[in-house]
């Protein structure tokens, strides 16, 4: 079966208007292509340069930026976050940067409280968003367990800004995007006109229809999920994983090493957690990666550590429950 046939079948089965794929093998881009539609209303085809909201794949860039600050000697991963951000709630201050990176902080994720979902259409300040969880007790002592936490990555964005003296976007642009030539990757701004931007959709199973996603303010995502990108740009990030351009081999190895919590509750899942990356054992070898999901979009970045192959999947439909499975289907073709 050809890749195009497989993706067209999956697109129809999952009701995905458009999907863009990139495959990087041995630092070479073996495929970068779009299938279906970036915008249904205007019949705009999806391409390798279609710009999608990549949601939580943003966390890979946030984690990379934090590791760069560590390499610069400006922070230690063992530092309590309060050393750099003394304005945080008292209970949060002893939490280490490493615990934030590996989702072991115990801070309640803001996406787990009803108040957040009542305000997703509003442009609110970062402080207001943090107020939704700031007064809540920690769910567990820091380091005791793993629990996926968007708030922790929001706080890491504050850390990047406080330590670097730059905005989150400026630091990532200077240290990651520009060095790699990722010209289409940027912070989401719904008021900006972004060339090649995809429209986001949802599939209504009851009525069997595709509908536009509702407005979702990017103020609620920040360093946990605010970036826009293309498979072309993300392929450049994938290529950098084989070199010391962004991070040393030692730092990359740290990020791809399981950082188990005290109770090791991660073991009941089919993955472990590194620093920013989720780690999975697959028949084709161990991989590091991250999925992303936000209203209107689903995405996956899968980096096979042993075979030097990376799959990037960006979709403009948000009910694709496991976008990484598209990459696994490509693996079955023997790529």
Image (cartoon, grey):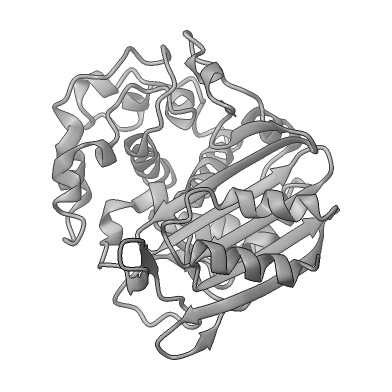
Whole-percent x and y of residue 144? Answer: 41, 11
Q: Nearer the viewer, residue 208 or 279?
A: 208
Q: Is residue 217 above or below residue 134?
A: below
- On screen, 62 above or below 326? above
**Observer able to see residue 191:** yes
- In the depicted view, which residue is nearer to us: 116 or 84? 116
Left or right of 78, for residue 161: left
Residue 308 placement (x, y as % from top left): 82, 46
Q: Is residue 264 left or right of residue 30?
A: left
- Which residue is pictured at 15% across the width and 54% down the height? 119
Q: Residue at x 77, y 38 (%)?
A: 305
Q: Is residue 151 left or right of residue 62?
A: left
Q: Residue at x 42, y 29 (%)?
A: 100
The quarter of the picture where the N terminus appears is: bottom right
Q: Nearer the viewer, residue 265 or 274?
A: 265
Please count the marks in the image.
Answer: 0
Q: Name the outermost residue toward the top.
A: 263
Taking the image as shown, residue 293 lies to the left or right of residue 302, namely left
Q: Quadrant of the C terminus?
A: bottom right
Looking at the image, can residue 181 be seen?
no
Q: Position of residue 63 (x, y in %)?
A: 52, 40
User: Taking 201 as reference, is 87 above or below it?
Assistant: above
């Amino acid at each position: 079966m050809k890749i195009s046939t497989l993706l067209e079948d999956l697109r129809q089965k999952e009701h995905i208007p458009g999907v863009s794929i990139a495959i990087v093998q041995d630092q070479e881009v073996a495929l970068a292509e779009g299938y279906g539609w970036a915008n249904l209303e205007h019949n705009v085809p999806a391409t390798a340069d279609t710009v999608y909201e990549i949601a939580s794949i943003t966390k890979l860039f946030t984690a990379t930026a934090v590791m760069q600050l560590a390499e610069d000697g400006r922070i230690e991963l063992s530092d309590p976050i309060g050393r750099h951000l003394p304005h945080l709630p008292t209970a949060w201050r002893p939490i280490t940067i490493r615990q934030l990176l590996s989702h072991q902080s115990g801070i309640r994720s803001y996406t787990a409280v009803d108040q957040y979902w009542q305000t997703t259409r509003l442009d609110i300040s970062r402080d207001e968003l943090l107020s939704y969880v700031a007064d809540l007790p920690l769910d567990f002592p820091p380091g005791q367990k793993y629990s996926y936490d968007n708030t922790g990555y929001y706080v890491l964005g504050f850390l990047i800004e406080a330590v670097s003296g730059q905005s989150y976007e400026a630091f990532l642009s200077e240290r990651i995007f520009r060095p790699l030539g990722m010209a289409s990757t940027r912070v989401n701004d719904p008021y900006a006109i972004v060339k090649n931007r995809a429209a986001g959709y949802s599939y209504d199973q009851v009525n069997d229809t595709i509908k536009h996603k509702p407005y979702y303010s990017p103020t609620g995502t920040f360093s946990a999920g605010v970036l826009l990108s293309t498979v072309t740009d993300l392929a450049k990030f994938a290529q950098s994983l084989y070199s010391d351009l962004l991070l040393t081999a030692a730092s990359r190895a740290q990020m791809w090493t399981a950082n188990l919590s005290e109770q090791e509750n991660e073991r009941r899942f089919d993955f472990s957690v590194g620093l920013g990356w989720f780690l999975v054992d697959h028949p084709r070898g161990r991989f590091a990666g991250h999925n992303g999901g936000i209203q209107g979009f689903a995405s996956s970045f899968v980096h096979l550590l042993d075979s030097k192959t990376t799959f990037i999947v960006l979709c403009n439909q948000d009910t694709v429950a496991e976008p990484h499975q598209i990459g696994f289907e490509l693996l079955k073709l023997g790529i």
